Amino acid sequence: MYLKLLLGAGLRLAVVGQSKVGTWVKTVSARTLCRGSGGGKSQSTQIITDNCARKEALLGTKMIDEWHAGKVSHVRKPKPVDFKIYCDESCHLEHDGNDAMVFGALCCDAPAVEPIVRAIKELRNRFVYHNEIKWSKLIAKQLPFYLELIDLFLGSGGLRFKATVVKNKSLLDHTQYNGGSHGTFYYKMAFYTLRDFLDKEKVYRIHLDYMDTQGNQRTQKLIEILGAAKPSVTISAQTIRSHESQLIQLCDLLIGAMSYSKRFDAQKRSATKARIIDHLENKLGRVLPDSTPPWEDKFNIFVFSPRKAA
């Protein structure tokens, strides 16, 4: 039992030193270090449990020393990630003057991430496109680049997109339903968007676009709630800046088209954005941003409209 506890503490410290998977680290440490085996607790286990906070660092350091000395041969490793999910949002601020809000997620088979990112970079080089891809900062002369980027998404079997669209967000009653917090509603949207991506026994890494200084805390709570809803799934997450991720930028392009198509009639759209929306609608064979059946796998859209308070 003592060796088992050492393994738990050592794994925590070793992972912290070599990886950014904070959710795994916390889960493994809490589960391994602070529990006994079976229904009861031995005396030695009780002592270590009672002093868990004070002993953890000491035990972990000792474990790492023993591992380097060749005295420990087995250290449990995290499971490999099966899927990576990249999230972004459009018009998510409460008082931004826009009445349609979109939260989108791009799910990618983990082995496909590197070749897809490489393909995006090759497109960038071919079109000499060095800017961050943002719907709000499209470049008219780069229209062919945007269209090929959409074709890359549609032609890749390793990519799936899902979005939640909120119409008439000015009708949202945060006081009654969200504890007075628009930020809480934002993470509810994230939960319902991400939930259906999660399959049993799979491992997911979620990348969320940096929103504000409270993002890490809210992200941790989101992961806890997703984990409770899907207990057989292993989930970790991090917030990153959008310019750091090609796939978050691709997600931005897709949700931008969704939001823009809802907010502007065809005759009021900019020429570049109208061409992108037309191209996407023609390829999909439907109008944006109409809801899709729940079983739609490649490009799934759920449209929600809050009721007006009585």
Image (cartoon, rainbow, N blue to C red):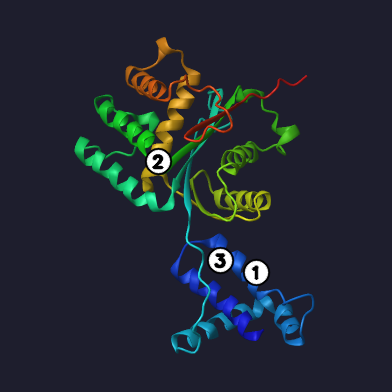
- Mark positioned earlier in the residue sequence (1 or 3): 3
Q: At which x and y percent is residue 285?
A: 43, 21
Q: Is residue 252 above or below residue 30?
A: above
Label ID, residue 25: 3
Q: Please rate how many residues cluster around mark 2, counting C-alpha atoms within 10 Å: few if below 14, some from 14 to 19, many from 20.
A: few
Mark before the other along the chain sequence, 1 or 2: 1
Q: Is residue 134 left or right of residue 310?
A: left
* Mark 2 and mark 3: Cα distance apart in space: 32 Å
Which residue is nearer to you in this view: 147 or 93? 147
Name the amino acid type tagged 1. Ala
Q: Residue at x 39, y 22 (%)?
A: 277
Q: Position of residue 16 (x, y in %)?
A: 50, 69
Residue identifier under label 2: 157
Residues under numbered marks 1 and 3 in contact, where contact means CB atoms less than 8 Å apart: no
Q: Residue at x 56, y 63 (%)?
A: 24
Picture coordinates of residue 44, whole percent (x, y): 73, 87
In which quarter of the view is residue 246 placed? top left
Q: Secondary structure under badge 2?
A: loop
Q: Is residue 283 left or right of residue 55?
A: left
Q: Residues within 10 Å of mark 3 (few under 14, many from 20)?
A: many
Using the numbered discs, state the Cα–Cα distance from disc 1 to disc 2 in whole angstroms: 37 Å
Of labels 1 and 2, the one closer to you = 2
Above/below status of 236 relative to 241: below
Residue at numbered disc 1: 30
Q: Quadrant of residue 190?
A: top right
Q: Mark 2: which amino acid? A: Gly
Q: Is residue 15 above or below residue 158?
A: below
